[in-house]
Image (cartoon, helix red, strand yellow):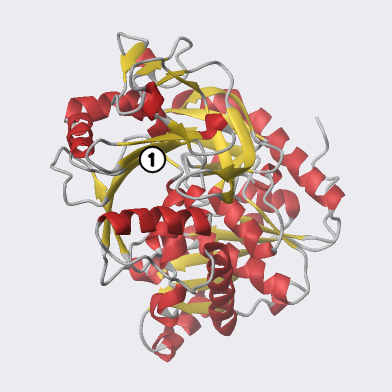
Amino acid sequence: MESEEKLKPIKTPLMVLGTSSGAGKSLTVTAICRILKNIGEEPIPFKGQNMSNNAWVDWEGGEMAYSQALQAFACGINPSSEMNPILLKPQGNSTSEVIHLGKSVGITTAKNYYKDWFIPGWEVIKKSLNSIYKSDPNCRLIIEGAGSPVEMNLIHRDLTNLKIAKYLKANCILVTDIERGGVFAQIIGTLELMKPEEKKLIKGIIINRFRGDLSLFEEGKKWIESKTKIPVIGIIPWLNDSFPPEDSLDLIEKKSRSSNPEIKVGIIKLPSISNFSDFDPLENEESIFIEWIKESQNLKNYDFIIIPGSKQTFKDQIFLENTGLSHNLRAYSENKGNIIGICGGLQMLGTTLEDPFFKEGSKNYLEQKIKGIGLLPLKTTFFKKKLTRQIISESLWPCQSKVNGFEIHNGQTELVNTQNSFKIKPIFKDLNLGWYKENKEGGTIAGTYIHGIFENDVWRDQYINLIRERKKLPALKKKTRSYKVKRESIIENLANEFDKHLNLSSLIN
């Protein structure tokens, strides 16, 4: 086994640990990445292991967590699966798909994960770190931890917190969320549970999400520093009110913020939903209000319905059928409704789903072939191999425009020869990326394999205008920035707000 003493970074890495899940590690790393980029450093984000179905595909076709992709954007670099060498994608029943360096390498139960995957996981983390430093020896890694670093029942097999911190001798920052309450106990308890050599790595503490006058916490800051002998390097205020409306933090915190919506969108809350970042561009359209649909109901009040991606398409299609949502969607389509399915959503809109190799959740059911919603004449067969790739294509509907995004799915979809097949048309010049058809009474049923389709400004605007036209609303004549430019502005503003209240100087010398 490779010696763990060989890796000696030129620039000491920074690592952001949290007193709990949800303490604000991801946004803190994002902000630090941009702060360091702005002062001329070469930051690179890293998270040894992430558990998420919200994935991104890099230019090599490798899967990684979307949060590390966002952090890469903050660094001004292309995302790479090396930045997130282990991705666990939950698929129900305490099982997860294991992704190593962007590629699927197996399925594991929670019970057997550390027994079967701990040693290979640590090797792939070291391989990624070596590769990153070989490519850019002068970079500074900004590492995100996971959950709490002192879960005592898991600490001996924790791949992504203190093991990485000790391996790299990183300068660690402990982040705690004061909004949750109990901030002093969170900090002291976390530090008390660390070994002395681990506690020595903690070089600073950040108090996150402070509401009100920051000077009111001055006594608390002194107490923490006196008790822990660790400086409080930042008290970060509650940031939502600091952002102008057009640059809302909601873009990266997934909250619909429209106050005067003209379009109401329903997104089906699938049990195995994946890639919910697909909807970020819609969340920030001022004319749109989004609701999540969890149970059977009359859908007539929605201007369009989205069926999102799924980690287990078979399971989620059975959920739609058993809850009555399939029936609701069919009734909605007959009432001039507009539906768009993305990836697994496209597959469910078809007539047939076949899972001969148990890839998409059919193993727990009696049949390996089930009916889809039946709104598009499509058949999907799930094979052993997953397709992951970046896409650049040209749309034919609702307008001609360049589009980019990525595919990440099992399953091959083909047109079924029926009397309705002539009504279905390709959305893109690449014919297998998506289809649509117009209903008799108006409205469209569409599906695409492209994740990130709504990030394409021209395509998104034309689709929204199609819906607006049917509501007899004037077309949007927007002169606002593109979604990606807006995302850049939000990251920049986030970094500026953190920079006002955060002192990193002692950690990066």
Q: What is the secondary structure assignment of the residue under circle 1?
A: loop
Residue 462's spot in the image, x, y percent? 44, 56
Tell me: 342 left or right of 297: right
Q: Nearer the viewer, residue 80 or 158?
A: 80
Quarter of the rendering containing residue 348: top left
The amino acid pointed to by label 1 is: Pro
Quarter of the rendering containing residue 465: bottom left
Residue under numbered circle 1:
308
Judge whether residue 92 can be spotted in this image: no
Q: Is residue 286 above or below residue 19?
A: below
Residue 120's spot in the image, x, y percent? 67, 28
Residue at 66% of width from left, 29% of height from top? Answer: 119
Residue 333's spot in the image, x, y percent? 23, 37
Quarter of the rendering containing residue 380: top left
Which image quadrant: the N terminus?
top right
Which image quadrant: the C terminus?
bottom right
Pointer 1 local density, CA inside 10 Å: few below 14, some 14–19, many at least 20: many
Q: Nearer the viewer, residue 249 or 215?
A: 249
Q: Nearer the viewer, residue 130 or 160?
A: 130
Badge count: 1
Residue 306's spot in the image, x, y percent? 34, 44
